[in-house]
Structures are given as structure tokens and as C-alpha cells.
Image (spheres, grey):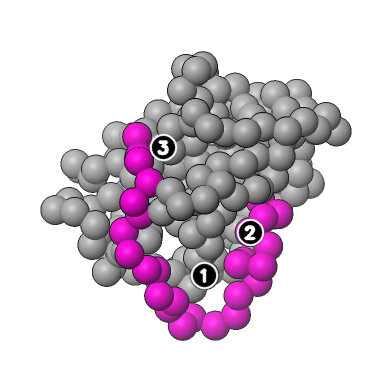
Amino acid sequence: MLTRSAHLLLVAVLGAALVTGCGGDDQRSNSQVAMDASVRVEAEGCGSQPVAGGGAFVAAHRVITVAHVVAGATEVEVVLPDRSEHKALVVAIDREKDLAVLDVNVDTAPLRRGSMRVGAKGEFITWRTGLPETRAFTSLAFVDIRAADIDDTEMVPRRGYEVRAAVEPGDSGSVLVADGAAVAVMFARSTQHPDRGWATDISEADSLIRTEGVTPVDVGSCPTADED
């Protein structure tokens, strides 16, 4: 697998969009697998309006998303593709690597977790209009990323991917799915290339996903890093 270093000094964090409205032996298509497990994450507490991002079930009752969507939140809920709304508890958060795990008491089949080769193609689900839509991506490189934490206090290393995709603000937290498996979590778009994005490898969230119980954690203050 191709590996190179990337010092992400000029990436725009996709951030939380303002809410203005609304493969294994699995025979389903890659896009349907991604769609079925996807959620829209909505959080209140940072600003006059809720903020939102993407996410997906990656274990029983466990949704992975980005920390900068739920940091500082006083209330979090998820919206499923059938438009049903469900309360969510933040049970694990990593403000340095910009990852968070939610407990959602819904029996949605989770994505299995895996990895992908350079050149692999897949899909991720966005909620730009309040409804889920499938977007395509291509993996360009597996990289060692150094990106600012959500408080913009230090550069933090993480493993991840550079991908070719049409990425827009509000796509943070969307889970990249290749060969029916969750492989990465979108967190930023390039400021130099409009068709490039950056995603954290799903393995970086392993310890968060393994968190047991449903006790909510302190999500801390609202993020201070610039968001786009």
C-alpha cells in the first residue's frame, strides 16, 4: 500500500453545517450498504442554530462521526434515512483526532470495518439537503496526516486517506464505504484542489468504538478551530 507523509497546513475543516431544514457476501450494492447504515448527526449548544454532519453505524448501537460536530453540544440526535429521529449520547470523543462515537438505541445493521487499497472506489452519504444522497470517491493515497486538533492548539498525527471526491461543507463525519466496509471518516476538504478531500482511517477510532456502556462523556467546549 502506497504510503507518504502529508502535512495538512492548508486544509479547510468541513465543519458543521447550519441546520436549515430538514464486500463480503452481502448482496446489496456498495451504495445501498452505505445508505442503510448512514445517519445525519444534529447537535445543539454551539450557536443559535443546531449544527450537523454525517455519520454511520459501525457497531451495535454505535455511530461514528467527527468530534467538531458534537463538541460543546447540550443535546444530540440522529436522523435515519427513513427520516426517523432518535436521541444520541456521546459516549466517546477524541478532540485531537476529531472523532466521536454516539450511542443510539436503534437496531440498525452496522457496517463492518475494513481498509482499502490505493485506487479503490467507493461511496459516502451526504445530507446537504436534509436527505441522504450517495457520492462517489476514489482513494488516491494512504497518508500520514498531521492536522490541527479541533481547538487549533497543536498539530496531531493520524492515519488516513487523500481521496478524489466532490466534498462540501457539512460533509464532515460522512463514512467512506468501499467493498461494503467502513474504511474512513471524512473530516476536511483541500483548499488547493476542489475535488480532493481528507479522511481519517477507521482504525483510528477502534478504541472509541469499543467503549462499553451508555454513560455520556463530557464533550467539552465548542470547537475553536476555523470551520468551513
Res. 92 mark: 1
Looking at the rendering, the stretch of residues picked out in magenta corresponds to: 201-228
Q: What is the x, y in percent for residue 114? A: 75, 49
Q: Residue furthest left?
A: 48
Amino acid type, mark 3: Leu
- Cα separation, mark 1 vs mark 3, equals 21 Å
Amino acid type, mark 1: Ala
CA neighbours of label 2 inside 10 A, class few (<14), some (14 to 19), many (20+) = many
Residue bearing mark 2: 205
- Among the two numbered marks 3 and 2 on one chain, the one whose residue lies closer to the N terminus: 3
Q: Are marks 1 and 3 in contact (CB under 8 Å)?
A: no
Quarter of the view holding residue 216: bottom left
The image shows a total of numbered marks equal to 3
CA neighbours of label 3 inside 10 A, class few (<14), some (14 to 19), many (20+) = many
Seen at 28% across and 68% down, the residue is: 75
- Among the two numbered marks 2 and 1 on one chain, the one whose residue lies closer to the N terminus: 1
Element on which disc 2 rests: helix
Res. 211 mark: none
Q: What is the x, y in percent for residue 169? A: 37, 33
Element on which disc 1 rests: strand
Examine the residues drawn in magenta and state their main secondary structure.
loop
